[in-house]
Image (tube, rainbow, N blue to C red):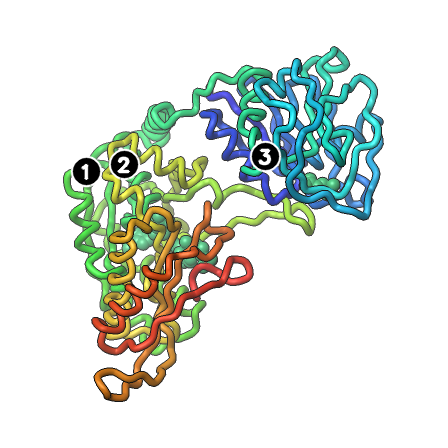
Amino acid sequence: MTEKVLILDFGSQYTQLIARRIRELNVYSEIVPFNKVPELDESYRAVILSGSPFSVKEERALRPDLDALIGKVPVLGICYGAQYIADYYGGTVSRSLKREYGKANLGRVRRSDGLFESIETGSQVWMSHGDTIQHLPEGFELLASTADVEVAAFGSDNGRFEAPVYCIQFHPEVYHTLDGGQLLRNFVMNIAGCTGDWTPAHFIEQTVEDLRERVGEERVLLGLSGGVDSSVAAMLLHRAIGDRLFCFFIDNGLLRKGEFEEVERSYEGMGLNVTAIDAKQEFYSALAGESDPELKRKAIGRVFIEVFEREAKKLANIKYLAQGTIYPDVIESVSVHGPSVTIKSHHNVGGLPEKMGLKIVEPLRNLFKDEVRRVGTELGMPAHLIGRHPFPGPGLAIRILGDITPAKVHLLQEADAIYINKMREYGLYDQVWQAGTILLPVQSVGVMGDERTYEQAVALRAVTSTDGMTAEWSHLPYDFLAAVSSAIINNVKGINRVVYDISTKPPATIEWE
Ligand SMILES: Nc1ncnc2c1ncn2[C@@H]1O[C@H](COP(=O)(O)OP(=O)(O)OP(=O)(O)O)[C@@H](O)[C@H]1O
Ligand SMILES: O=c1[nH]c(=O)c2[nH+]cn([C@@H]3O[C@H](COP(=O)(O)O)[C@@H](O)[C@H]3O)c2[nH]1
Ligand SMILES: NC(=O)CC[C@H](N)C(=O)O
Ligand SMILES: [Mg+2]
């Protein structure tokens, strides 16, 4: 049984980060809304309470029953989590008009305590709160202070409860808390006694076993996109059920330049059963004359389903559809406006299961993207497949603003290939999370060889991100941007202007449509 750390989400913007930090210790962690605590069987070794935009002093504060948790397993409260524990057990928390936001240093630390082992006095921490803990509840002791807050950390491991409880006002999960990783390690490994059994090898072994059990002797269908998620899902299934996995790779005419052939080639030698399907014309016909972004997406989704359905009919007895759904797609988070379900799903073959009566298998639904990559590496997949930037299912159709024609696709493919190749050449590809070129529906005047031109413009997009939910525009070097711009304008006839997109998400999104 894999050991687990449970994270109760009170709506902090950092909740996912807590889960990732724990997983970096090779310990499995899962996030649940604060009010959906599962039965704590012995696989749960510890519970962490996240921060929150709420204040414990508010009427609407989120107030789960802590008696069900505290004393059962070691508990760590972070920020709101700490304030709530203080408040719950009879301490006092006061609201202050002044927020403490940013770096602070732990001025006094009770280092004899397990939570602060190997952490020096003066260690830099990151604060983000308005409320202050004034008095500790009975049975708790002060563990650390900063210049601004007396109660930066406190805990109870003296017998008031049967398991230790620790509370910290700062955020150990953000990188600005320099010893945050050490603190979490102290809590998870030393105090909660986790051993670190969540490794890619362990995950593969267990998943392959589960898949064999689940799928039995049935056949499984999988849409392969050339992207990381579907490729790793395919490899896992292949290991579990071999030739009973049938992969379809569809050329929708909206892929990058040379991508169809390249992806086909990279799957050779991996042992997968892949059928490549040329459906370019079907997609182009469905998109003809359509310029509304949502209608374009819908048309593409519809054709994906049609193609899948038709091809699947040629194979008898398919019972399952495999999807590369990953953890950020399924986490239920608490939103600032109250507990709600926010699930982002972009899955392009989404309508298929109901239509064909297929059951879904999602071998990656517990993994973050970087973990998917580590599993892929462990499975022996080539580095260029693992390191690929994410690419949307609707492809270049959502990067060509307005209606789609094969000629526009061609124009964008050429510009995009120059951008991406140069990015590799300059050693920037792996520093960027995702990059692409957007064909703008504007023409502008230029001059080339003493002649007037009146041609289209492209925008370059490059972002850094961890999961695509938020993103920063990448600060790419000017000499690189200059080289790309001149290569595109000199080599792609039809484009005479290149601009760089400097918008973050939110409020912009990564794709333009
Ligand atoms: N050209 C395609 N042929 C077959 N299936 C596809 C194609 N494009 C997308 N899909 C299906 O849609 C799913 C969602 O695509 P998505 O881009 O989110 O994931 P991915 O391609 O596996 O990974 P990545 O996010 O790294 O691109 C894929 O997992 C795949 O099953
Ligand atoms: O498979 C996909 N089908 C889609 O319909 C789709 N739309 C956006 N994306 C990808 O999702 C991430 C976030 O994109 P946005 O900021 O544009 O919402 C980025 O990585 C986008 O490339 C998609 N992927
Ligand atoms: N980051 C947090 O958890 C903040 C908790 C609470 N809203 C405060 O301002 O003090
Ligand atoms: Mg993709």
Q: Amino acid at mark 3?
A: Thr
Between residues 443 and 379, which one lies in front from this camera angle? Answer: 443
Check if mark 1's residue and mark 2's residue have beta carbons within 8 Å. Answer: yes
Check if mark 3's residue and mark 2's residue have beta carbons within 8 Å. Answer: no
In the picture, which quadrant includes the C terminus?
A: bottom left
Q: Amino acid at mark 1?
A: Met
Q: Residue 451 is drawn in which quadrant? A: bottom left
Residue 322: x and y in percent read 34, 42
Residue 360 appears in the rendering: yes
Q: Residue 106 is drawn in which quadrant? A: top right
Q: Report which residue position mark 3 lands on.
A: 177
Q: Earlier in the sequence, mark 1 or mark 2?
A: 2
Q: Which residue occupies 54% across, 58% down?
A: 506
Alpha carbon distance from label 1 to label 3 = 42 Å
Between residues 228 and 456, which one lies in front from this camera angle? Answer: 456
Q: Which residue occupies 81% across, 48% down?
A: 97
**Quick check: 334 above or below 457?**
above
Q: Secondary structure at mark 1?
A: loop
Q: Secondary structure at mark 3?
A: loop
Q: Earlier in the sequence, mark 1 or mark 3?
A: 3
Q: Residue furthest top?
A: 159
Q: Earlier in the sequence, mark 3 or mark 2?
A: 3
Q: Which residue occupies 28% across, 84% down?
A: 447
Between residues 383 and 99, which one lies in front from this camera angle? Answer: 99
Looking at the rendered structure, which numbered label has been put on residue 270?
1
Q: Report which residue position mark 2 lands on.
A: 235
Residue 349: x and y in percent read 36, 53
* Image position of 238 (left or right of 92): left
Q: Residue 501 is drawn in which quadrant? A: bottom left
